[in-house]
Amino acid sequence: MSLAWLVYLGLGAVAGVMAGLLGIGGGLILVAALVWLLPAQGVPAGLAVHMALATALASIVLTGLSSARAHHRRGSVLWPTVAWLVPGMLLGGWLGSLLATRLEDEWLRGFIAAYCYLAALQLGLDWPRAKQERPDAPKGAAYSASGVFVGAISALVGIGGGSMTVPLLVWRGVRPVRAVGTSSACGVAIALASAAGYAAHGPVNGDLPPGSWGYVFVPAAVAIALASVLTAPLGTRLAHRLSGEALRRVFAVFLVLVGTSLLWAGT
């Protein structure tokens, strides 16, 4: 277990940087890695994807809090927008986790891989294009409605929703660094609702290893969260200093590799 802890800490460090830097990707990295690692911890192969999703989302709660706090200190969280998005995201996250617990492993694996490829395409094309920057924070019931969709999809693929929330806000005229900061805050709500759903609807027949809370493998979630909390502010600092275009394209390639690794793990 000591080696596993080191691996989980390393995963958390990478996920934290990605969460602060791009507002996306940390969850997808975690899910792909955990699908390979959790069976070695006694997780049945047929439940590895479910537990990877639940564990990644549980760790994202603290990662998102750390990233959101760092962005807030730099004034890059649009809290009025968060207030409109979060109610729908909470509902969507719970419903998405409920749906995921009723899907077979191979269906979830294929859905996550497809999402990785679509997210890579969106990053590579830099679509949708940003509108002219707006001075106010986007608000309105339409954002709450869109939050349900973002929350549900996020629960199904194990992310904090940044790969949908950031493009949405940029398209509505929000400066990219503020879109990332706002997305980090929203991701906390998505992760909370989704992880709670996975914990509540986990199997009760004793198939899971000690330390499991429903589908959440607590030791891995804690180790990942501890490291990610420390590295998320580093990603935030980099986000305020680096040009995003090259980073987006590099990460698009990485997402293709993540999606392919998920499909390979299922063969």
Image (cartoon, grey):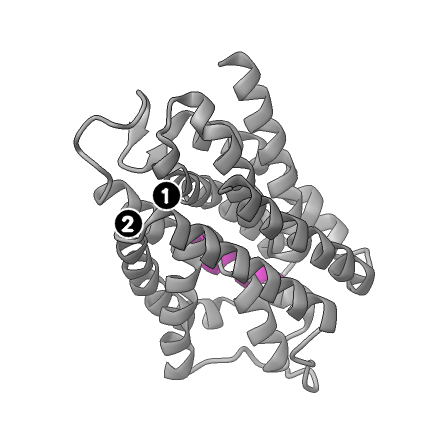
- Is residue 66 in view? no
Q: Label 2 is placed on what type of residue?
A: Thr
Circle 2 crowding by C-alpha within 10 Å: few under 14, some 14–19, many from 20:
many
Above or below residue 229? Residue 75 is below
Please, which residue is most extreme toward the bottom here? Answer: 132
Look at the picture and state if 62 lies above or below 224. Answer: below
State the residue at coordinates (77%, 61%): 249
Query: Looking at the image, which residue sits at the far left?
Result: 205
Please state the horizontal and vertical placement of residue 172, each as a whole percent of the image: 59, 82
Q: Which quarter of the picture shows residue 205?
A: top left
**As rendered, which of 48 and 27 lies closer to the eye?**
48
The vertical placement of 249 against 46, above or below, is: below
Left or right: 252 in relation to 64: right
Residue 134, given in percent of the width and then of the height, sits at 64, 83
Q: Is residue 25 left or right of residue 187?
A: right
SS for tag 2?
loop
Say which element carries label 1.
helix
Q: Is residue 246 visible?
A: yes
Give me the residue at 53% from left, 20% from top.
4
Q: Which residue is mark 2?
A: 101
Q: Earlier in the sequence, mark 1 or mark 2?
A: 1
Q: Which mark is residue 23?
A: none
Q: Are marks 1 and 2 in contact (CB under 8 Å)?
A: yes
Compare residues 136 and 65 and report the one nearer the observer. Answer: 65
Q: Which residue is mark 1?
A: 50
Q: What is the magenta segment's predominant secondary structure?
A: helix
Instruction: Return the x and y of residue 50 as percentages of the image width and height.
Output: 37, 43
**Range covered by the magenta-colored residues:** 180-188
Magenta run includes residue 132:
no
**Is residue 122 found left or right of 45 in the rendered image?**
right
